[in-house]
Every structure is written in structure tokens, then in C-alpha cells.
Image (cartoon, grey):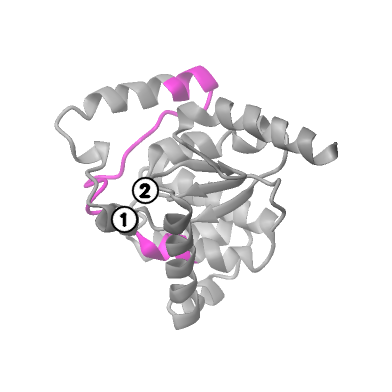
Amino acid sequence: MDGTRPVFYYDFSSPYAYLAASRVDDLLPVRPEWRPIAFGVIVRRLGKQPWSFKENRNRDFDEIARRAADRGIPEVRYPEGWPVETYSLASLRAALVASDDGEDRLRAVSRELFRTAFVDGRHLADLDAVLDAAERAGMDRARVRAAIETTEVKERLRAETDAALDRGVTGVPTVAVGDRLFWGDDRLEEAVEAAAGLATAAED
């Protein structure tokens, strides 16, 4: 991987990652590499409590709604039972399968999956919802269904998540720029500055 190229780490369970995905390509001066990872595994490994499990999570709901309105994107809806009952490894595996068709396909499937969860309010734990999203993005439904159950794809997701942890990623969304990590939708602007500086240094 080109060391000057940013990496965008995300999981479809995160509304903040949904917000970041809607603008990360437009903000960064270098088109980032998108990498889906299993945030649920990161939480378990690090013993973290996500904000969505806390009693005061309404503050985050309000902030997410404000950002969506300010950016002119659809109102954020949450699937019933989110986040515990809706968490999905199948959606992350589907994104990895999409990446085999190239970066544009990965982006298209990822955006459809985010839309399914946070615009349509559908459970990504529902395999049909995942396959519907992949199909809308131009993928063959049967191919995706078969591929996400393979040992190869499951191991790839584990490897991507382990690599993110080894790099120091502790949450999503995170943008990695060189050896710096910017965790949070509200830190994208900092990532932009870092990426611009790294790109300039690479040209010198």
C-alpha cells in the first residue's frame, strides 16, 4: 500500500461511520482506501463500552441528527434493537467480497449497506437486507450469499480487524494518515490537514 494514502476504517453498525462515509472521499486530498473492520471484535478485545450502550446516549443521537441535517443527508434512522440485535458480520464480509471487484464496487456496496441501516432502518442482521444492498450495487446475489460463508472471507475479516488493532485503531470511523490515527467523524478535518501535509512532503 502507498504509505501516503489515507485509510478509512469503518463498520456498518456505526452512525458516525455513516456520517463520515458520506464525505470522506470529498474532504481528503488523496482518495482513501476503504477498509471494513469488525468493531464488535475491537470492543470485546479492548473491553470498551461504546457510547451506544451508555445511559446518556441521547446526546449522541441529537448530535448525529444535527450533523446529518447540517450536511443535507437523509435523517438518520435506527433499526429496532440497534445496536445489539442488529450487529452483522455478514455485511462486513459482503463488503470484502465487493472489494474483489475493485474499489468502486466496495464503495457502492458500502454506501448501500449504510443506507440500508441508517436511512431505511433495516436490520443488517437480516441476511436478505445485506443481499438486497449488494444487489442494488450491482453484485450477483447468489455469489455474495455463497462467498460470505467461506472460510477465506471470514479469515480475511479477522485479518483486517487484527491488522487495524495492531495499528492502534480503537474505534470507528478512523482515518489513518501515515502513522497518525484520527478517530471520529469530527476529526476528519484534522485528517485532511495531515493528508495534505503528507502528500506535499512526498512530492518534495
Q: How many marks?
A: 2
| Residue 148 can be seen, yes or no | no
Is residue 37 or residue 140 the one in the foreground?
Answer: 37
Q: Badge 2: few (under 14), some or many (20 or more) residues near its Cα, within 10 Å?
A: many
Under tag 2, what secondary structure?
Answer: loop
Q: Which residue is mark 1?
A: 40
Above or below: residue 197 compared with residue 99: above
Q: What residue span does the magenta drawing correspond to? A: 67-93
Q: Which mark is residue 13?
A: 2
Q: Give the quadrant of residue 44.
A: bottom left
Under tag 1, what secondary structure?
Answer: helix
> Magenta part mainly helix, strand or loop?
loop
Q: Is residue 43 magenta?
A: no
In the image, taking residue 62 as reference, residue 161 lies left or right, namely right
Residue farthest toward the bottom in the current orientation of the protein:
151
Is residue 170 or residue 138 the one in the foreground?
Answer: 170
Q: Badge 1: few (under 14), some or many (20 or more) residues near its Cα, within 10 Å?
A: some
Residue at (21% x, 47% y) in the render: 81
| Residue 99 can be seen, yes or no | yes
Report the amino acid beneath label 1: Gly
**Closer mark to the observer between disc 1 and disc 2:** 1
Rendering coords of residue 195 (x, y %): 67, 35
Q: Give the quadrant of residue 58.
A: top left
CA–CA distance between discs 1 and 2? Answer: 9 Å
Marks 2 and 1: in contact by CB < 8 Å? yes
Above or below: residue 191 compared with residue 134: above
Name which of mark 1 and mark 2 comes first in the sequence.
2
Q: Is residue 79 magenta?
A: yes
Q: Which mark is residue 91?
A: none
Residue at (25% x, 38% y) in the render: 52
